[in-house]
Image (cartoon, grey):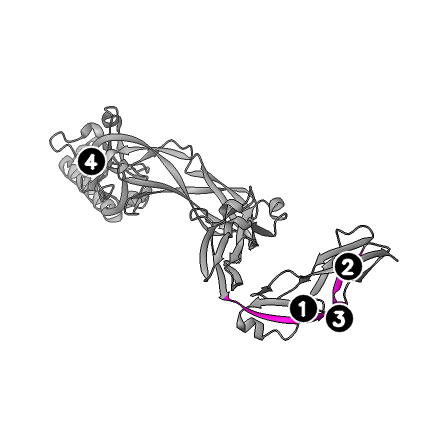
Amino acid sequence: MREALTKNWGFKVLALGFSFLLWLAVVNVQDPVMTKTFTGIPVTVVHPEIITNRGNTYQVVEGTETVSVVVKAKRSDMEKLRADSIVATADMKNLDTKSGTLIPIDVTITASIRNSYEAYATPGNIQIQIEANKTKSFPITVNTSGNLKDGYVLGEAKANPEKIEISGPESIVTSIDKVVASVQLNGESEDTELEARLEIYDVNGKSIAMTTLEDNLEGETVKVSITVQQKKSVAVYFDTSGIQVADGYVLEDVTAEPQTIEVVGEAEKLDKIDSIKIPAEVLKETNLTETVERTVDIADYIPRGLRVLDETTGVPVVVKITVAKAGTKRFEFPVGSISVLNIPSGYKVSYDTTGNIEIAVIGTKEELDSMSELEQGSVYINLIDMKSEGSYTVPLEIVLPNGVQLDHEVTIGVTLEKE
């Protein structure tokens, strides 16, 4: 038996070697080595403190922050690989001292692989820029879009915090022009708080990415507080009693443009106002002989606590005072047709004259020509100040068309006695 085992030893070794080679060939055919390229692999910089501890900062040159990774591995292992199991790192300790900008990239695979593999990045380096670190404070500007509920306007929009500190490469930080918190309004009708993401812009309005910058905020958003106010359209009235025209002329009309303005404020204050009255001294004129225009800023006459939408330009109102050469026209009006207001209870009134009373008016030819008579009820007396029996002289009150006025005051004698 021993002789059989040791006989032809050389042939047996040769057969064993051939069997191994055959096994290896079969294995390689069934599980061959493959090559695959994974693209868009991000590169992580490690040990950045080598730069930052010196008061500097760095940024990865655009276009080198991701790489392609070539992997050679058995097919059985390759099938396990995904892009997220490939890690590319650039160690700041390996920064090329000659160029001062290139760092070689190391590639590791986190997936469980049974066999050996090869993996390398292309390109094999990332490129960085090193410069001084700068920190600067910026106010946060609020930008709103959309609309509030009809009848409401935006009072104030304020970011919280109102400022932000940004740190990063000096060239980027110094290029920042403004930091904006943008919020979308959606029919709000009361004060509220909204969340907003920040956008950073340079002087050309181009957005600046935060990838190489740091800030002092705790999160990625800020709160924006908005106050909401109501608006109301109110009429503007001018007291025209201070306007005097020259002899032989008549004040034909006084018009204002705009006739109404929109004011903004709390609902309680808006409920108390329907018009804005401008005092007589604002339009004070004497001896006018021609039509004039005046621009009046009525901002000072808006009640406290209210405002107009645009306060930057004041509240200008253009007032046109129309003056025309006067003509005269006389009317005979029956005394018995004079209306009486405010007769004291238990009294009766009688006139000291009967028949007609002459009333002279002045105005433009056009207005006078349109008047054929004084309308019933347009002439009256007011006895509000007469409280006891006696004789009184009272002025006639006459309702006249625009552009027509009394030539002179007309009075009438009346007697008040108990019924």
The relative height of residue 50 versus residue 223 in the rendered view (above or below) is above
Sequence-first tag of 1 and 2 = 1
Q: Secondary structure at mark 2?
A: strand
Q: Is residue 87 visible?
A: yes
Q: Left or right of 213: which side holds 254?
A: right
Name the residue that disc number 1 marks: 358
Residue range highlighted in magenta = 325-343
Q: Quadrant of the N terminus?
A: top left
Tags 2 and 4 touching, CB below 8 Å: no
- Which of labels 2 and 4 is toward the front? 2
Q: Position of residue 293 (x, y in %)?
A: 45, 58
Q: Look at label 2 and name its amino acid.
A: Val
Q: Look at label 3 and name its amino acid.
A: Gly
- Membership of 19 in magenta stretch: no
- Membership of 340 in magenta stretch: yes
- Which of labels 4 and 3 is toward the front? 3
- Residue 236 falls in image quadrant: bottom right
Magenta span dominant secondary structure: strand
The relative height of residue 368 versus residue 157 in the rendered view (above or below) is below
Q: Left or right of 404: which side holds 43?
A: left
Farthest residue, direction top: 53
Q: Position of residue 285 (x, y in %)?
A: 49, 54
Name the residue that disc number 4 marks: 129
Residue at mark 1 to residue at mark 2: CA–CA distance: 17 Å
- Residue under the point 53% across and 58% down: 259
Q: Left or right of 110: which side holds 298?
A: right
Residue at mark 2 to residue at mark 4: CA–CA distance: 103 Å
Sequence-first tag of 2 and 3 = 3
Q: Look at label 4 and name its amino acid.
A: Gln
Tags 1 and 2 touching, CB below 8 Å: no
> How many C-alpha atoms fall within 10 Å of the one at disc 2: few (<14), some, or many (≥20)?
some
